Amino acid sequence: MAEAEEQETGSLEESTDESEEEESEEEPKLKYERLSNGVTEILQKDAASCMTVHDKFLALGTHYGKVYLLDIQGNITQKFDVSPVKINQISLDESGEHMGVCSEDGKLLLFERSWMSRWKSSVLHEGEGHIRSVKWRGHLIAWANNMGVKIFDITSRQRITNVPRDDISLRPDMYPCSLCWKDSVTLIIGWGASVKICSVKERHASEMRDLPSRYVEIVSQFETEFYISGLAPLCDQLVVLSYVKEVSEKTEREYCARPRLDIIQPLSETCEEISSDALTVRGFQENECRDYHLEYSEGDSLFYIVSPRDVVVAKERDQDDHIDWLLEKKKYEEALMAAEISQKNIKRHKILDIGLAYINHLVEKGEYDIAARKCQKILGKNAALWEYEVYKFKEIGQLKAISPYLPRGDPVLKPLIYEMILHEFLESDYEGFATLVREWPGDLYNNSVIVQAVRDHLKKDSQNRTLLQTLAELYTYDKNYGNALEIYLTLRHKDVFQLIHKHNLFSSIKDKIVLLMDFDSEKAVDMLLDNEDKISIKKVVEELEDRPELQHVYLHKLFKRDHHKGQRYHEKQISLYAEYDRPNLLPFLRDSTHCPLEKALEICQQRNFVEETVYLLSRMGNSRSALKMIMKELHDVDKAIEFAKEQDDGELWEDLILYSIDKPPFITGLLNNIGTHVDPILLIHRIKEGMEIPNLRDSLVKILQDYNLQILLREGCKKILVADSLSLLKKMHRTQMKGVLVDEENICESCLSPILPSDAAKPFSVLVFHCRHMFHKECLPMPSLSSPAQSCSICCAKHRGPVSAILEMKK
């Protein structure tokens, strides 16, 4: 519950009830200040009894029957001596030209502004006792006396209704009625602890008779906790000024407490409290319910709390006030968000100041990482503030916390800042130091300073891989690629190849090829072969001379890429394959055209490489020796048969049959595979009687099936050949039966003159061949006895064979 307290200076501020100060988390809706200047002067001699508010001025009534007109700041502009007794209520119309005043003498006076701003008065009502309250809205005036509330229509000069008071047990002079217009047809009545909301409605013409044209309907009625001293509308809510009495715990006697200003939400039969403020006004201990009044300025949402010795102005809190409250409650993040959203409307606060306060708050709570992270958003591109905050974090030993969030581009801080943080990590966290060096651009700090610091640490721990790798990265930033490469190779680091490619360091690795191959032979070979123009094949082979296993890896990859580039090393490769990679020896021998066969045969025979020796013997033309080795060394009839098929040599088949004739398994293999190459009868006749041959029946069946298949294939091929021949013959016949156009554009292929004479009457003789060549008959040689048919000399010269004439033209 917020309070308005009087300070020694006479100012007014909000505070919190001591019993609820620590627990209250609800933000107040209003803020308060005293209306001073002329008001202070008036209240030194008189006591305020009521007030009304207009957009242009204020009207203040006093206990001595005076009415003061004030400007909005509270300065006196005009004074009226209205009555010798207390002024109960003042009301103004919207134009400010009419003023209704009621006083303790029981009269309701109407003041109208006339010529030269003079006011003319007239009596609207009297004779029903004291008029306690009056409110004007549009053409309607509402006033209250001891009997109830009356509503008067200025236009028709008729009283519309009378709303009687409910609680007659309360003295009307001590608990007067409070009135306010929510709009031009809605009147709110507060009397005692009761609230009524009344709606003025138009009466239907058929119901009027002698009745007023309007009537009043009560649309809502409810009770409040305290006695009502004043009412004012606030959107769809109500502002209620309440008179409060409490019982002392010590004396158990009732006393006057501070008045309350509540914001409530009216419902049909009850209400809901939105906020409640206790106000410390001057002399509240002696005041009664009748001494308080509430007025409001609808356009500005200003509420005036009037008491005999004080006038307090309540205003809706603006965004600056909201931020003040959030900061007071240490809700810095919400305050920062509110300032960012309303940055165009706030006047007293700056986003940066709130942000800095938030950072300090987080640091005080020990939430260093969150504080550092917020620096990015709050400090933005302000380099000076960044540097200031870094030093603050250094003072509390939290440089590591702010390091991930330091700006690295826009803005850039002084190099000393980055160096200071790097040194902090270097002293206590090698991994963190390496991460920063990897993430930070090398131009943020003095590279040579950090390099020297790392080298000093390596003197104590020379084999620390993290420091060595970081030093290599620092050398790279400094373009000292030689030192970086040396460290990478020592560490066998994967980035060594990327470094070589990126910075074209091939001249630096010519003497480090073995190291690269030892580290990753595949990547090293690929890199070397991709850059033959920078490091020659000869140079690589020479460097690997003492490491033949690596030499083989390189030359093998070279051969796979291009069979001819490394031909000078093919002889060397025979021994390398034989020693380190026999599975690829035979493919190499097959694909290489530069390999010395005698040398290869010698090596293979020395090592007893049968398959390779067989291949070399066959390639050198010694097929019979190769076949003999297959049969004697490998004992593989299938391979022997396959070899004989590849060579397609009758003598080899004879050798194979002779070798196999006394070996039943070999005979079975031959019977199963020989059918399409050698007549099986030759083999079957040589089989000794009584020899037991495995699966002989199946082999013979297969031979017969293969034979039948061959017969079927031959017959099928013959049918196809005959059909095709007949089809082509018919096509040729149709073609040769077609006519050939001969005109003056055609020439004799022999004399090259036009084939037809220019004189159509002149006799001529022309021969046209199937090949479409044309000749004058006299230009062709005479047919001989051996070849009586004439033929095309051009086609005969091209070895196409003689082509007989298809047409002879004569005239």
Image: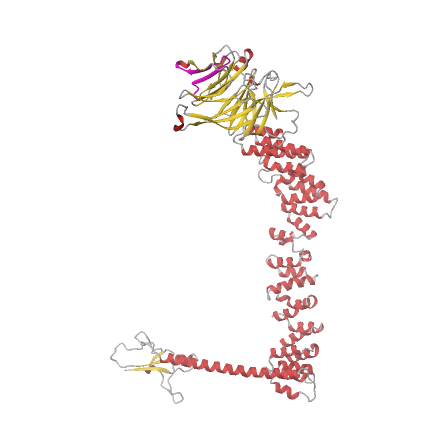
Q: Is residue 101 left or right of residue 691?
A: left
Q: Please state the horizontal and vertical placement of residue 293, each as a whole percent of the image.
A: 54, 19
Q: Please state the horizontal and vertical placement of residue 229, each as a whole percent of the image.
A: 55, 21
| Picture residue at 41% right of the left edge, 82% below the top | 802
- Farthest residue to the right: give it: 460
- Position of the C terminus, as image quadrant, is bottom left
Closer to us: 717 or 343: 343
Q: Please state the horizontal and vertical placement of residue 324, each as a whole percent of the image.
A: 59, 28
Q: Is residue 405 left or right of residue 54?
A: right
Q: How many marks?
A: 0
| Residue 804 visible here | yes
Q: Quadrant of residue 603?
A: bottom right
| Residue 72 visible here | no
| Picture residue at 45% right of the left edge, 17% below the top | 99
Image height check: is 676 above or below 545? below
Magenta stretch: give its range: 94-115
- Farthest residue to the top: give it: 84
Q: Quadrant of residue 607?
A: bottom right
- Position of the N terminus, as image quadrant, is top right
Image height check: is 634 above or below 160? below
Q: Is residue 109 magenta?
A: yes
Q: Please state the horizontal and vertical placement of residue 355, each as a whole percent of the image.
A: 60, 33
Closer to us: 709 or 393: 709
Q: How is the image coloured?
A: secondary structure
Q: Is residue 273 magenta?
A: no
Image height check: is 762 above or below 561? below
